Amino acid sequence: MFESLQERLGSILNGLTGRGALSEADVSAALREVRRALLEADVALDVVRSFTDKVREKAVGAAVLKSIKPGQMVVKIVHDELVAMLGEEGVPIDLNAPAPVVLMMVGLQGSGKTTTTAKIARRLTDRQGKKVLMASLDTRRPAAQEQLRQLGEQVKVATLPVITGQSPVDIAKRSVQAARLSGHDVVILDTAGRTHIDEPLMVEMAEIKAASNPHEILLVADSLTGQDAVNLARNFDERVGITGLVLTRMDGDGRGGAALSMRAVTGKPIKLIGTGEKMDALEEFYPKRIADRILG
Ligand code: GDP
């Protein structure tokens, strides 16, 4: 396991107890450790840079309190700044629009989009009494459509019947029409991913958006994504315009750095986290918990 940041900073800074204020040199030494911890947690490099700049501003000249050790003080400054950068907790999915409210799920293949679609559908059904319709727009992989249908059966949420040969845009339009006719409150569109971001994917997402007027566009991303997290989030946000993030595989042993990277580049809230393969493994986002994890 990694040595915790708290321990590392302790060994660098604790000789300073009783020395008045943190100097530029003390802070620089501490920030080298902070930087290392963030990179180990897979936070993207440019996010690490802007983060350490902010911490430097707050820490240089800060009075070394008698009651706590200097290392602990820097850890607190770092922790508070991480929590601030990770953003607000408990931001709900916004359903405040005329029915049917369309939620569009976007992301790379394998990120957990289909699973998350069904988890969200289940949550809105069970907790908010919403009538939800799910539709798979993945015409490239028939197995994906079948996967959503099966998950729909499992969570007892309707899925749009598949008509072979329809384009993703046609399916999106048909979903909204079907929901309107049968009185569904919410439509969740599970779009097709790719193994990496490419132009056709972005064009397809833009077309689906134009055809279905989604109220939320949620980027589903694997929390184990490393330095690519920034590119991924930036591309989807610039090209499609996301309204929030869902991070999956938070049950894995990653340190959660992607959360910070994606939040920092998009400024969009992390709305939910996936914590397992089961349909109830979807939780609220608590920035303090992720900050603790990043710090180790
Ligand atoms: P998609 O290609 O983006 O639709 O991805 P899927 O929804 O098919 O998910 C890919 C795999 O990841 C499946 O085996 C899921 O069960 C699994 N998965 C999705 N979310 C989570 C999660 O939060 N934790 C874990 N451990 N596995 C997940």
Image: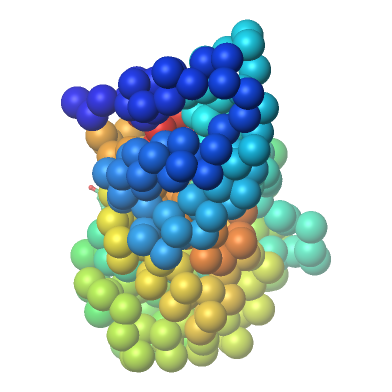
Q: Quadrant of the N terminus?
A: top left
Residue that sits furthest to the top in the current view: 67
Compared with residue 123, is residue 206 higher up or lower down, i.e. above or below? below
Q: Quadrant of residue 199?
A: bottom left
The percent position of residue 263, horizontal first and vertical second, equals 53, 56
Q: Quadrant of residue 79?
A: top right
Compared with residue 203, is residue 23 higher up or lower down, i.e. above or below? above
- Left or right: where 34 falls relative to 241: left
Number of numbered callouts drawn: 0
Residue under the point 28% across and 40% down: 254
Q: Nearer the viewer, residue 13 or 237?
A: 13
Q: Quadrant of residue 197?
A: bottom left
The percent position of residue 294, horizontal first and vertical second, equals 40, 37
- Left or right: where 82 falls relative to 145: right
Residue under the point 25% across and 34% down: 253
Q: Nearer the viewer, residue 254 or 244?
A: 254
Q: Quadrant of the C terminus?
A: top left
The percent position of residue 69, horizontal first and vertical second, equals 52, 15
Q: Nearer the viewer, residue 260 or 140?
A: 260
Residue that sits furthest to the front in the current view: 19
Colour scheme shown = rainbow
Residue 258 visible (yes or no): yes
- Left or right: where 130 falls relative to 41: right
The percent position of residue 102, horizontal first and vertical second, equals 63, 67
Residue under the point 79% across and 58% down: 96
Residue under the point 53% across and 80% down: 238
Residue 246 visible (yes or no): no
Compared with residue 204, is residue 163 higher up or lower down, i.e. above or below? above
